[in-house]
């Protein structure tokens, strides 16, 4: 999924149905495969708005102008040659090997995590959740879904954390965070911590070098331990080529929230 698609979906999920931004975003998505051939005049006509409104919209979702937005619209499946992306990895595997192989991969990775689980790491993060008043959780695409899920699961238990689907708001929050903030990063590959994953050439991400927050990673990439800005991590293994992290995230979060409840009860007794 490209950066433009992500940002347009964020608009749909956050803007009012009768807003101009919602209307433009929906129109662009409905004509997505033609955007790279459409002029700003043609897009303005499609949306029934002025060219200046289209330009303003492009800037409001993080692009320099309409031409920058248009450049991001070129749709190439696996544009950045990431063989771990959803279509190339999961859907192609199911199509080639069938559903039984997919279930086997999930079960194998769950068993591997069950046997290698670091309960101390989960306890440390659970304790941090109790002790930090300001907490945020971020990820990209399916990893951001895990962050949203954690937000809901903690809310059920009286702990309220921040998350954003917008990559722009995520970076702003990370860069501005102080020492009193805990940020949990969901990233199977660990690339969220080091790369601009949705940008051509995947340039380096420098925002973590400027943050003062405590960064805790949930990832399968143990090399993240060596990143100077990563204070701690929960690491899970992959025994197969199938990217099962969306399932593993759920298991990790359930155990994390359970331990948070445990520590909160201890605190209340004391």
Image (cartoon, grey):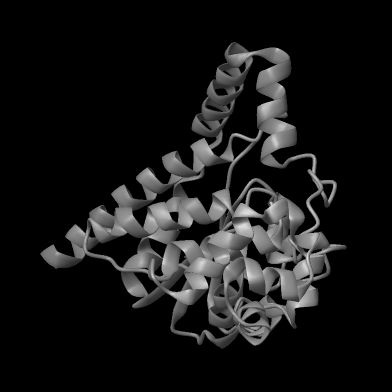
Q: Residue at x 71, y 78 (%)?
A: 63
Q: From where the camera sits, is residue 252 visible?
A: yes
* Left or right: 257 as drawn, with respect to 97: left
> Residue 172 appears in which quarter of the rendering?
bottom right
In front here: 220 or 27? 27
> Where residue 228 sits in the image (x, y, percent)?
71, 72
> Residue 89 appears in which quarter of the rendering?
top right
> Where residue 229 sits in the image (x, y, percent)?
66, 73
* Left or right: 132 as drawn, with respect to 263: right
Q: Residue at x 48, y 75 (%)?
A: 20
> Residue 185 appears in which quarter of the rendering?
bottom right
* Left or right: 205 as drawn, with respect to 98: right
> Where residue 125 sits in the image (x, y, percent)?
43, 60
Q: From where the camera sits, is residue 184 visible?
A: no
Residue furthest toward the left?
269
Q: Residue at x 43, y 42 (%)?
A: 250
Q: Residue at x 65, y 35 (%)?
A: 243
> Where residue 211 sits in the image (x, y, percent)?
61, 83
């Amino acid at each position: 999924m490209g950066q433009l698609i992500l940002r347009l979906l964020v608009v749909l999920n956050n803007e009012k149905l009768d807003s101009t931004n919602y209307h433009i975003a929906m129109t662009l998505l409905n004509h997505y495969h033609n955007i790279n051939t459409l002029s700003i005049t043609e897009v303005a006509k499609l949306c029934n708005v002025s060219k200046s409104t289209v330009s303003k919209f492009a800037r409001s979702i993080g692009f320099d102008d309409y031409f920058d937005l248009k450049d991001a619209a070129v749709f190439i499946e696996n544009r950045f040659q990431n063989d771990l992306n959803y279509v190339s990895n999961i859907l192609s595997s199911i199509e080639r090997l069938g559903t039984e192989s997919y279930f086997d991969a999930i079960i194998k990775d769950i068993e591997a995590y069950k046997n290698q689980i670091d309960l101390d790491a989960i306890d440390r993060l659970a304790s941090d959740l109790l002790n930090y008043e300001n907490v945020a959780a971020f990820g990209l695409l399916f990893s951001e879904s895990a962050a949203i899920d954690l937000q809901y699961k903690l809310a059920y238990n009286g702990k309220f954390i921040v998350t954003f689907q917008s990559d722009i708001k995520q970076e702003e929050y990370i860069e501005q965070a102080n020492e009193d903030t805990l940020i949990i990063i969901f990233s199977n590959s660990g690339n969220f911590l080091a790369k601009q994953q949705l940008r051509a050439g995947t340039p380096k991400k420098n925002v973590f070098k400027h943050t003062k927050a405590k960064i805790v990673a949930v990832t399968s990439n143990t090399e993240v331990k060596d990143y100077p800005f990563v204070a701690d991590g929960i690491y899970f293994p992959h025994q197969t080529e199938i990217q099962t992290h969306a399932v593993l995230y759920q298991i990790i979060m359930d155990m994390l929230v359970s331990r948070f409840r445990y520590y909160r009860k201890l605190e209340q007794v004391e």
